[in-house]
Image (cartoon, grey):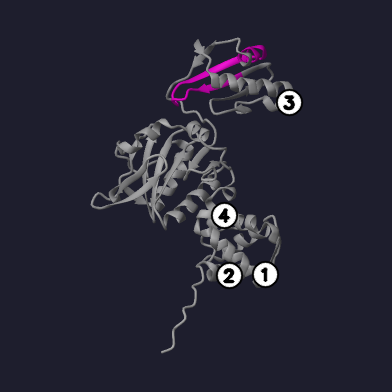
Amino acid sequence: MARFQVTDELRAFMREVVAKVDWIDDRATLVGPDALSCECARGGRLPNSDRYRFTYFARDGRGRWELELGEQQLRDLADGHTSELDARELDPNTRSTRGEALIVWGEFDEDALRVRSPLDLATALDALHAIGQGDPLLVRLWSAADEQVVIALNGNECALFVVHGDTYGTSVGDPTRTGSFEVRGEDIGELVIAWNQCVPWRVARPALLVFAEQGTVGEGVILDGAIPTQLLMLGDLDRAAALASRRAPPADPALSSLPRRAPQGAWAERLLNALVELHLIELDSAIFDAIAARTSILLVQHRDAEDSPEAAQALAKELSRLRGVGALFATGGDLQIALRRTQDAPTMPVDVPLA
């Protein structure tokens, strides 16, 4: 055991804990290692006991402490009567989750997503990949334990820069490639990306899914141990700092800016309008925008529906369950035809002047 100096963020968390202890009738909901949590700590009441155990993690992501407290100690902490505690310092190499993974692709509140599941992250990545088909895009992803990777998307290729974590560096692509492209980030300005730093998206996508959970890109991507100077400062900006600069981002991809920015957003509107005109769907036109946003996310998740009968049938099933959709009369085959006809925006007719 060692003496631990109480921080302001831990004291604020203890005020929340005491409030729940006082107001929650069912104390069983306070039991467990993740029953109570915030950005700096997590823990809960011990089974068959009146004591509480918490793990506190320092802002640097390395210092970790285990605190075991009685209810009166909780109150003393919350009221500011205690400045030091006996605590057990954990192995600094122990990796602890600090909440949900976070992905950010812009400066506005909706240009971010709190990741609740691997499916939501995969959906966000696929939508961002679709956006990057038109213009290069810079994205930042924090893992559940606050490791951070910067992602430069351009078409079907991607450069990864791990700026915080046990593995550190830039992705290594084909060393024989020459040339570069530029991408702009809200915190760093223009960044030049060499093509020999890029790996195919089919390689980067699974590596990013692993990174969000484990904090490493795995064996599919090689890192060279260095990152551009412009990105060095990003390693000091943890998830808490990113969240402090904006309102809480949504945890639902449909409520983020993805439906508006990804090409699937406009495609969803064309698809729904076509189904309405063909009397193959009944929907509440008063909430058309919300239905279109949900549909755009389904198009991302079932991106091969126009070619796969099974995926089209699955898309039809989920589309029929959306709030605001009264009935869907289209079969999977009908949906495939509609998808193919609406995938691209219609071209405007050109008048040919008479001679």
Above or below, comparing residue 305 to residue 277 in the picture: above
Q: CA distance from mark 4 to mark 3?
A: 37 Å
Residue 124: x, y in percent? 51, 49
Indicate the amino acid at tag 4: Ile
Q: Which residue is mark 3?
A: 24
Separation of disc 4 and disc 1 at Cα? 20 Å
- Give the residue number, with chain letter if any, for mark 4: 297
Please report contact status of discs 1 and 2: CB closer than 8 Å, yes or no. yes
Sooner in the amino-acid sequence: mark 3 or mark 2: 3
CA gap, disc 3 to disc 2? 52 Å
* Mark 4 vs 1: CB contact within 8 A: no
Left or right of residue 347, residue 226 in this image = left
Q: Amino acid at mark 3?
A: Ile
Q: Do the residues under discs 3 and 2 have CB atoms within 8 angstroms?
A: no
- Segment colored magenta: 53-77
Element carrying mark 1: loop
Q: Which mark is residue 338?
A: 2
Q: Residues within 10 Å of mark 1 (few under 14, many from 20)?
A: some
Q: Upstream in the sequence, badge 4 or badge 1?
A: 1
Residue 223: which quarter of the image?
Answer: top left
Residue 54 forms part of the magenta stretch: yes
Q: Which mark is residue 280?
A: 1
Q: Are marks 4 and 3 in contact (CB under 8 Å)?
A: no
Secondary structure at badge 4 equals helix
Near mark 2 (Cα within 10 A), the count class, few <14, some 14-19 or many ≥20, is some
- State whether residue 311 is above or below residue 11: below
Q: Residue at x 58, y 18 (%)?
A: 11
Image point 23% across, 52% down: which residue? 176
Check the picture and name the quadrant holding the C terminus.
bottom left
| Residue 236 sits inside the magenta stretch | no
Q: Position of residue 160 (x, y in %)?
A: 37, 44
Q: Nearer the viewer, residue 218 or 81?
A: 81
